[in-house]
Image: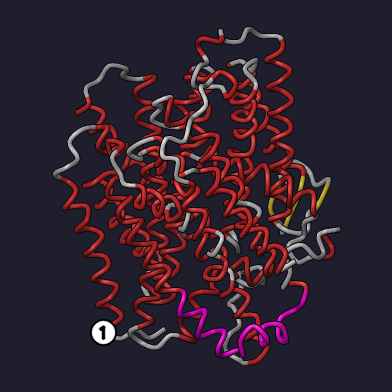
């Protein structure tokens, strides 16, 4: 791909700008709370955009375009089934517990609700997951720089990691959040024109219908059997595995996104943050999935749009967006498009690193190493954790090279961590009889069951490291099924052990369990400030989309 001076200038200006934000905010960050939690002083519109942008990393922009080419419109389930309802549930039901308990992280809430060992187990698994996800974003960014700019892959990894490190190290979470807002607009402005140009080239939606396999142009048709749809899943694994377990497990318990709501100025803003974010979220398939479908139509009508192959001969679906940028964007706009991709990858990496340094500092270091340190001390520990998170991310970036679809990889990771965690939260918030022992052993059983299931099943050559007793049609199908299996294991074990162990007294659970927490009243009396009514509107629009593209 040939870039001109104007393209390099746009990319350079972006790098300077994001580092500049870190320098500007540096003087406002003086304590551990400032560095790791932004002193809970971020406006609603910022937290809402940061909430969606923290998820708008490589796994979404690059991975969803890859999924669009590989699976077609079935990928929209990640939004219309696997996001909207869970984001509304988080805002309406779960944020009052998170925000009201004054917990600084999701693991800290687990400590308040259950006990220290449950918190520590979740903190450790979450820390592993965040640096792994961060490494995926870093890998995607390095791959892009290698293909687009001709940079050496190893050099690209270190350059990208250094830029992210500088602006997080200087401005902490606040710097990451404000950069995420900038990155959101860059992603939309940089990728949306690609969709319009691509649609025009293939002859609009009619051209897509004529040139793309009909099996890839539906969201529900063909889910009666894994053999009848390109995603290789059935309705049960789609609805229960993705729509319930993975969706609620990610949006309601993953500290990466929950943190963006927890730093709001007040509870009302914290509740509305995920619901307002759900509005652009349900519209994102038009920007991140449609390019993958457009490239299928272009391959049918023209030459030169073929995807490169991996060493095993499979198409490298991760290259969908870079190929489209190369073929469809003129110079100038090309620089904006490349910058948008770079922004998305850096957003994903920064979000994970800031979640990692908070969990490490508060839930591991402060809990087990130095309980009574000063704010200044934890400020420096947070900075040290940032350095460690970046270095580990660099190592995991090389692991991601072995997958032809980074979204499949991340869904697998989520099925190990978030799926059983949601079972723990669901029982803990709505069944006061749930005990700390039950939660801990349930989490352990869920994660262990996920590992066992992965070891006994195979999908696209991955898994089966114990034995191959079942083969799934796709990596996505394997991840969805591992998710609901690990959820059930955690759910059952937590109940059984809770029934034979001593629960906490009711007075210890006020503000932590739904039945023992005073219900929030809408003091504003304005419908558009009521999280429940906002959620209903989002659900209606989502339902309409599902009907249109049935």
From the viewer's side, name the closer residue of 200 and 10. 200
Residue at 46 percent across and 31 percent down: it is 98
Depicted 200 relative to depicted 484: above or below: below
Q: Is residue 213 magenta?
A: yes
Q: Position of residue 350 (x, y in %)?
A: 37, 51
As helix, strand or loop, the secondary structure at mark 1 comes to: helix
Total labels: the figure holds 1
Residue at 40% x, 73% y is 189
Residue lying at the far front of the rendered structure: 525
The residue lying toward the viewer, choosing from 96 and 230, is 96
Residue 245 position (above or below residue 62): above
- Main SS of the magenta part reads helix
Residue 535 inside the magenta-drawn segment: no
Q: How is the image coloured?
A: secondary structure
Give 46 or 329, whichever is nearer the viewer.
46
Range drawn in magenta: 192-214
Q: Examine the rendered structure and indicate whether residue 538 appears above or below residue 41.
A: below
Name the residue at 56% across, 18% down: 516
* Residue 468 visible here: yes
Residue tagged 1: 5
Q: Is residue 434 left or right of residue 54?
A: right
Q: Quadrant of the N terminus?
A: bottom left
Image quadrant where residue 306 sits: bottom right
Residue in view at x 48 percent, y 35 percent: 95
Q: Identify which residue, 189 or 521, lies in the foreground.
A: 521
The quarter in which the C terminus is drawn is bottom right
Give the percent coordinates (x, y) of residue 383. 26, 38
Residue 113 screen position, x and y as percent: 52, 20
Q: Residue furthest left?
A: 27
Left or right, 345 with respect to 298, comes to left
> Is residue 132 among what the camera can see?
no
């Amino acid at each position: 791909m040939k870039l001109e001076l104007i393209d390099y200038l746009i990319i350079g200006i972006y790098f300077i700008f994001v580092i500049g934000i870190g320098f500007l905010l540096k003087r406002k960050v003086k304590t551990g709370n400032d560095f790791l939690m932004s002193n809970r002083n971020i406006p609603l519109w910022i937290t809402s955009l940061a909430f969606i942008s923290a998820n708008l990393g490589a796994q979404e922009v690059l991975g969803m375009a890859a999924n669009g080419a590989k699976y077609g419109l079935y990928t929209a389930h990640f939004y219309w089934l696997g996001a909207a309802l869970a984001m509304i549930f988080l805002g309406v039901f779960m944020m009052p517990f998170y925000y009201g308990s004054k917990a600084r992280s999701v693991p800290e809430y687990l400590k308040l609700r259950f006990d220290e060992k449950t918190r520590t187990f979740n903190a450790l698994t979450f820390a592993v997951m965040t640096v792994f996800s961060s490494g995926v974003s870093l890998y995607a960014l390095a791959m892009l720089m290698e293909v687009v700019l001709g940079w050496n892959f190893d050099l690209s990894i270190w350059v990208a990691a250094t830029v992210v490190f500088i602006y997080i190290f200087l401005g902490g979470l606040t710097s990451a959040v404000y950069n995420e807002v900038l990155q959101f607009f860059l992603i939309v402005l940089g990728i949306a024109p690609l969709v319009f140009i691509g649609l025009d080239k293939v002859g609009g939606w009619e051209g897509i219908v004529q040139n793309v396999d009909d099996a890839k142009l539906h969201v529900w048709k063909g889910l009666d059997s894994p053999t009848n749809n390109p995603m290789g899943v059935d309705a049960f694994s789609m609805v229960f595995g993705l729509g319930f377990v993975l969706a609620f497990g990610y949006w309601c318990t993953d500290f990466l996104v929950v943190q963006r709501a927890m730093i709001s100025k007040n509870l009302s803003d914290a509740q509305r943050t995920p619901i307002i974010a759900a509005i652009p979220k349900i519209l994102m398939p038009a920007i991140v999935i449609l390019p993958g479908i457009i490239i299928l139509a272009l391959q049918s009508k023209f030459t030169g749009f073929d995807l490169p192959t991996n060493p095993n001969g499979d198409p490298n679906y991760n290259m969908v967006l870079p190929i489209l940028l190369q073929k469809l964007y003129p110079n100038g706009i090309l620089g904006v498009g490349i910058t948008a991709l770079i922004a998305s990858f850096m957003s994903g990496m920064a979000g994970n690193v800031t979640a990692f340094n908070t969990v490490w500092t508060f839930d591991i270091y402060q809990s087990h190493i130095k309980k009574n340190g000063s704010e200044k001390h934890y400020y420096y520990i947070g900075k040290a954790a940032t350095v460690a998170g970046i270095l580990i991310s660099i190592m995991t970036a090389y692991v991601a090279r072995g997958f032809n679809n980074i979204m499949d990889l991340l869904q697998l990771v989520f099925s190990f961590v978030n799926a059983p965690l949601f079972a723990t939260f669901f029982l803990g918030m709505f069944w006061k009889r749930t005990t700390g022992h039950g939660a801990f052993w349930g989490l352990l059983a869920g994660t262990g069951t996920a590992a066992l299931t992965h070891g006994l099943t195979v999908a696209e050559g991955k898994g089966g490291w114990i034995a191959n007793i079942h083969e799934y049609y796709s990596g996505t199908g394997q991840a969805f099924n591992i998710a609901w299996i690990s959820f059930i294991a955690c759910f059952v074990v937590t109940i059984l052990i809770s029934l034979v162990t001593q629960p906490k007294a009711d007075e210890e659970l006020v503000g932590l369990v739904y039945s023992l927490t005073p219900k929030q009243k809408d003091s504003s009396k304005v419908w558009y400030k009521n999280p429940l009514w906002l959620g209903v509107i989002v659900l209606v629009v989502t339902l309409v989309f599902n009907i249109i593209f049935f």
